[in-house]
Image: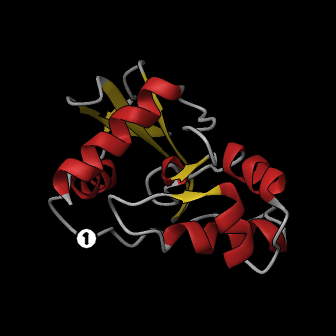
């Protein structure tokens, strides 16, 4: 079931999909959720700089060891800061694997909790599943609230 909440500054819904007690996906959408969500509200409060990041049991089935390392590094990027794909690769012990980091970010099923929007290209924003405008809004929102 998809639950969520509207985030006014982004003009999008933050959606949370669960399977049992585990979260299988967190994403942004223009389409409203089936139901409201306390967890989506807690994640939105974190994104808006009001509270610490909520504890979320993520379903990591199917993740590779590389993805687990990359996602762990990305979760450590402080709010209001960015790292390049190359910096993330080096921090994960895989210097030179910046393209693989980009692929891991593109497959990230847990936006905000694994803040892939904080990973940027060496010369520019880089990609983002929600598009460059959403990535810019997320980064601006975080830098304004940090």
Crowd class of label 1 (few under 14; some 14 to 19; many from 20; radius 10 Å): few
Q: Where 44 falls versus 73 (above or below)?
A: above
Inspect this view and state whether residue 57 appears.
Answer: no
Inspect this view and state whether residue 31 appears.
Answer: yes
Answer with the quarter of the image where residue 145 lies: bottom left
Q: Where 8 falls versus 103 (above or below)?
A: above
Q: Residue at x 47, y 58 (%)?
A: 82
- Direction from residue 85 to residue 4 in the image, left or right: left
Report the quarter where the C terminus lies. bottom left
Total residue callouts: 1
- Residue 14 x %, y %: 38, 38
User: Mark 1 — residue?
Assistant: 52
- Residue 72 x %, y %: 60, 74
Q: Residue furthest bottom?
A: 93
Q: Residue furthest front?
A: 123
Q: Residue at x 46, y 60 (%)?
A: 113
Q: Where 100 falls versus 6 (above or below)?
A: below
Color encoding of the figure:
secondary structure
Q: Secondary structure at mark 1?
A: loop
Residue 7 or residue 1, whichever sits in front: 7
Q: Residue at x 53, y 29 (%)?
A: 130
- Residue 87 x %, y %: 65, 66
- Direction from residue 50 to residue 115 in the image, left or right: right
- Direction from residue 26 to residue 71 in the image, left or right: right
- Residue 34 x %, y %: 39, 29
Residue 51 or residue 55, whichever sits in front: 51
Residue 6 or residue 88, whichever sits in front: 88
Q: Residue at x 43, y 53 (%)?
A: 112
Q: Residue furthest top?
A: 31
Q: Where 88 falls versus 9 (above or below)?
A: below
């Amino acid at each position: 079931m998809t639950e969520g909440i509207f985030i006014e500054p982004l003009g999008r819904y933050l959606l949370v999909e669960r399977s049992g007690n585990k979260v299988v996906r967190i994403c942004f959408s223009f389409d409203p959720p089936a139901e409201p969500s306390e967890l989506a509200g807690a994640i939105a409060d974190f994104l808006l700089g009001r509270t610490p990041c909520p504890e979320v049991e993520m379903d990591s089935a199917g993740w590779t060891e590389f993805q687990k390392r990359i996602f762990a590094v990305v979760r450590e990027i402080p709010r209001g800061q960015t790292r390049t794909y190359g910096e993330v690769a080096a921090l994960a012990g895989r210097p030179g694997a910046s393209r693989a980091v980009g692929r891991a970010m593109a497959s990230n099923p847990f936006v905000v909790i694994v803040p892939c929007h904080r990973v940027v290209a060496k010369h520019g924003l880089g990609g983002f599943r929600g598009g460059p405008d959403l990535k810019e809004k997320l980064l601006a929102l975080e830098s304004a609230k940090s």
